[in-house]
């Protein structure tokens, strides 16, 4: 068995592994198990099919969102995103397994769906922190929510067993979306000094190692967010990255000391959770209704 898997399992049992989930977790051999777009380009194209946007913005999510926000109002953009993600979606076994782990202080999820929230079900010792748009909440960077969807003060998050951090927002429970050019400019202007990142996230990442699953680092925004969320954590991390890497991705992995795992998402999860009786549970990476 590869040494990195035993090391990873040890970090997970000790509460020092942070799963960092991207929309690629839904990919299945080039197909998708999700009823919504599962990458930035396909989401941009989905928006452009419903509202005509300039050709130069049709495949660039932040630009397409900005055009709709500027020309049709923010309410129209929010309505389109609600329609896109407010659909019954399967919970992956990965979601359910992560939601069942008692020693998992922090999970980062950078897509807009609510599948992981649904996976927590009736569990009560967790909560969610979402990034919010300055256009809708001037002066605020985040909102916090309890398992029942009611809003909580950020100070309450320090008592949660698990914090689910959604830096770009989520469709549930209150439909926050950090998505347009103006949204991202506001955040990226401040993120280097960590202002948009909640203190509880900063504390729980300290000394932890991140495991990136379903993520790509092809755009500057993706790399910047990951780089800033990794600050003051461990100096070694892992990523399950299928396919060829771009030159920018290769440089980023090297810079951030992220070891690329050769195992597929399915193989990685099956093996990792089987290594310890505390984590075992027959994880099978398939959609569950």
Image (tube, rainbow, N blue to C red):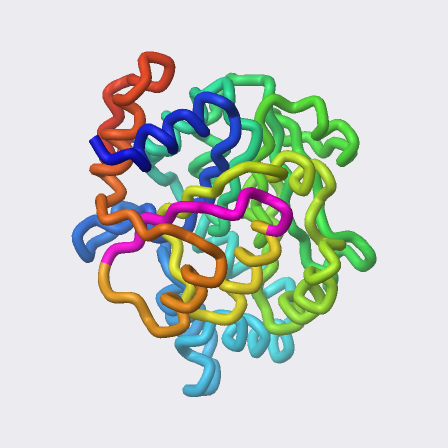
Residue 51 location in percent, x, y? Answer: 47, 74
Membership of 233 in magenta stretch: yes
Q: Quadrant of the N terminus?
A: top left
- The vertical placement of 52 against 197, above or below, is below
Taking the view exactly as shown, the residue that stands out farthest to the top is 277
Q: Which residues are magenta?
A: 231-242
Membership of 29 in magenta stretch: no
Residue 153 location in percent, x, y? Answer: 78, 33
Q: Is residue 38 visible?
A: yes
- The vertical placement of 23 against 122, above or below, is below
- Looking at the image, how many numbered discs can be counted on the residues? 0
Residue 144 location in percent, x, y? Answer: 69, 37
Q: Nearer the viewer, residue 1 or 128?
A: 1
Taking the view exactly as shown, the residue that stands out farthest to the front is 3
Q: Nearer the viewer, residue 103 or 123?
A: 103
Which corner quadrant of the image does residue 138 belong to? bottom right
At horizontal 36% and vertical 56% (from top left) the residue drawn is: 38
Which corner quadrant of the image does residue 155 belong to? top right
Q: Nearer the viewer, residue 118 or 208?
A: 208
Taking the view exactly as shown, the residue that stands out farthest to the left is 29
At horizontal 32% and vertical 52% (from top left) the residue drawn is: 260
- The vertical placement of 39 against 278, above or below, is below
Residue 88 location in percent, x, y? Answer: 38, 39
Q: Quadrant of the C terminus?
A: top left
At horizontal 57% and vertical 50% (from top left) the residue drawn is: 230
Taking the view exactly as shown, the residue that stands out farthest to the bottom is 55
- The vertical placement of 113 against 84, above or below, is above
Task: Assign the magenta stretch its main secondary structure.
Answer: loop
Q: Nearer the viewer, residue 37 or 154?
A: 154
Q: Is residue 86 visible?
A: no
At horizontal 51% and vertical 21% (from top left) the residue drawn is: 103
């Amino acid at each position: 068995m590869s040494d990195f898997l035993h090391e990873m399992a040890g970090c997970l049992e000790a509460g020092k592994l942070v799963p960092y989930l991207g929309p690629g977790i839904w990919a299945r051999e080039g197909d998708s198990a999700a009823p919504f777009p599962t990458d930035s380009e396909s989401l941009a194209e989905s928006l452009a099919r419903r509202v005509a946007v300039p050709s130069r913005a049709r495949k660039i999510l932040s630009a397409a969102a900005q055009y709709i926000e500027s020309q049709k109002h923010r309410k129209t953009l929010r309505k389109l995103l609600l329609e896109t993600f407010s659909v019954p979606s399967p919970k992956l076994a990965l979601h359910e397994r992560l939601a069942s782990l008692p020693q998992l202080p922090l999970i980062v999820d950078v897509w807009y769906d609510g599948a992981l929230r649904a996976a927590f079900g009736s569990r009560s010792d967790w909560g969610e922190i979402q990034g919010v748009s300055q256009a809708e909440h001037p002066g605020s960077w985040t909102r916090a929510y309890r398992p029942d969807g009611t809003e909580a003060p950020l100070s309450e998050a320090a008592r949660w067993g698990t914090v689910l951090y959604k830096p770009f927002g989520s469709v549930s429970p209150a439909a926050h979306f950090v998505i347009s050019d103006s949204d991202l400019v506001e955040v990226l202007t401040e993120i280097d000094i960590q202002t948009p990142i909640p203190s509880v996230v900063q504390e729980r990442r300290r000394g932890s190692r991140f495991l990136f699953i379903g993520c790509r680092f092809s755009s500057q925004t993706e790399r910047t967010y990951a780089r800033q969320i990794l600050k003051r954590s461990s100096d070694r991390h892992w990523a399950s990255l299928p396919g060829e890497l771009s030159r920018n991705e290769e440089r980023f992995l090297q810079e951030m000391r992220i070891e690329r795992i050769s195992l597929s998402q399915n193989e990685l999860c099956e093996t990792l959770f089987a290594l310890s009786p505390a984590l075992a549970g027959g994880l099978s990476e398939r959609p569950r209704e």
